């Protein structure tokens, strides 16, 4: 949150028995690198501790910033700084972190710009966070500069999905997965062949449902904006034919949550009469997308950010930034019973 002239606060609150608890402050400062696309997050590690990350400036250059960490062992009541996630001090970009829990730790994946000091490309790195941060590993030396990463765990092994970048500026979605302790090189989830000479700031989302891996993303390949999803039934070793979710000039900004044996639910920013519309669709294990359900009208402006979707027990929680004219920006939260969504999607597809 913006604390006025004094900078920013990173705050944390838990939902307990249907009530949001009083927020605690994780970190604050005038040096935060706060922006519309790359936002802080909190992950519960395998040992029950919580790890938070945020971005802060580290130099005078416009894009000199690093990823900073704090850890809590009392369910978020107090936080201890862990310093930087990235193990370099170059005046370059570092961000778009995604997390998975491991046995007694949390594993981070992020976009790392240290090679840019010598005019190199953005890279993808990973490290493990316990009471300290492990040395990082390079997973891919050339990726898209500012599309968010996303993670999943299949059969106990982590994977990361991201927007790759070829020498010829093809920027399609790829994954890197770990198998028997070894990282398997990048593989595209689909061959969109989207050639674009700049970053679209529109990363993928992933989830595991019923043992299958689901990945959703936005592309505008062949000047045809669309949101797609794809299934892998072998943990990411191969992918089926992409499923069209929305071909009516959507804005993208996807998210995805597991519905277990029912498949997965994708959220995205669709085209709408007032600018944009937040929609949800169920993607079934058979590789079918149920007709979409509209949640609310919203805006497509960058200030509206990236809506986030989570599932807790039998409810979906969709959160977005409301930037309606004439009033201060607000965070809004919709609670949607999963049964109601499945029923609505079923009725829509049968009509």
Image (cartoon, rainbow, N blue to C red):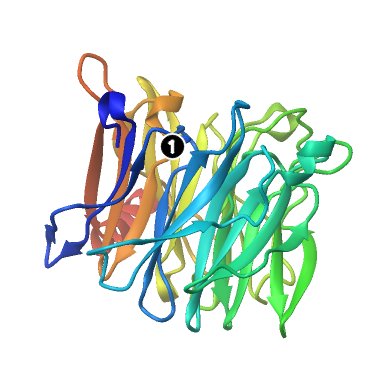
Q: How many marks?
A: 1
Looking at the rendered image, the quarter that the N terminus falls into is: top left
Q: How far across and down, in percent of the image, does residue 100 sit?
A: 51, 69
Q: Residues within 10 Å of mark 1 (few under 14, many from 20)?
A: many
| Helix, strand or loop at mark 1 | loop
Left-right relation of 344 to 158: left
- Note whether residue 54 is visible: yes
Along the line of sight, which residue is nearer the eye, 66 or 59?
59
Does 218 sit above or below residue 49? above
> Residue 293 occupies which quadrant of the picture?
top left
Query: Percent x, y for residue 278?
Result: 37, 38
Q: Residue at x 24, y 58 (%)?
A: 340
Is there any visible trace of residue 286 in the rendered image? no
The residue that disc 1 covers is 32
Find residue 320 and report its horizontal and vertical position in percent. Answer: 32, 39
Horizontal placement of 29 versus 219: left or right?
left
Residue at the (88%, 37%) spot, across then down: 168
In this rendered view, identify the residue nearer to me: 184 or 318: 184
> Where 299 sits versus 154, above or below?
above
Task: Give the residue drawn at x 60%, y 73%.
Answer: 158
Which is nearer the eye, 306 or 80? 80
Q: In the displayed orientation, state which residue is furthest to the right.
A: 167
């Amino acid at each position: 949150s913006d604390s006025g002239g004094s900078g920013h606060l990173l705050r944390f609150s838990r939902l307990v028995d249907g009530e949001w608890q009083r927020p605690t402050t994780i970190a604050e400062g005038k040096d935060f690198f706060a922006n519309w696309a790359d936002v802080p997050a909190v992950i519960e590690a395998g040992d029950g501790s919580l790890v938070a990350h945020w971005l802060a400036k580290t130099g005078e250059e416009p894009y000199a910033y690093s990823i900073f960490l704090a850890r809590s062992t009392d369910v978020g009541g107090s936080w201890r700084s862990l310093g930087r996630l990235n193990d370099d001090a170059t005046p370059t970009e570092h961000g778009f972190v995604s997390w998975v829990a491991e046995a007694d730790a949390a594993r981070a994946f992020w976009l790392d710009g240290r090679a840019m000091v010598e005019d190199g490309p953005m890279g993808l790195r990973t490290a493990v966070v316990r009471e300290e941060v492990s040395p990082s590993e390079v997973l891919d030396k050339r990726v898209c500069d500012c599309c968010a990463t996303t993670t999943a765990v299949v059969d106990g092994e982590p994977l990361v999905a991201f927007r790759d970048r070829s020498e010829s500026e093809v920027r399609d979605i790829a994954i890197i997965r770990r198998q028997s302790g070894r990282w398997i090189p990048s593989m595209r989830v689909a061959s969109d062949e989207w050639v674009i000479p700049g970053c679209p700031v529109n990363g993928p989302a992933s989830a595991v449902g019923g043992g299958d891996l689901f990945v959703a993303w936005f592309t505008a390949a062949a000047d045809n904006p669309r949101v797609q999803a794809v299934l892998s039934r072998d943990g990411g070793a191969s992918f089926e034919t992409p499923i069209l979710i929305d071909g009516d000039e959507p804005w993208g900004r996807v998210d995805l949550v597991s519905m277990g044996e029912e498949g997965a639910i994708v959220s995205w920013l669709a085209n709408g009469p007032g600018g944009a519309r937040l929609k949800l669709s169920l993607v079934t294990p058979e590789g079918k997308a149920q007709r979409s359900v509209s949640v609310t009208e919203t805006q497509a402006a960058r200030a509206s950010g990236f809506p986030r979707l989570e599932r807790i027990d039998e409810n979906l929680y969709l959160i977005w930034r409301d930037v309606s004219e004439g009033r201060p920006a607000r965070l809004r939260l919709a609670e949607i019973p999963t049964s109601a969504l499945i029923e609505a999607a079923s009725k829509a597809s049968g009509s």
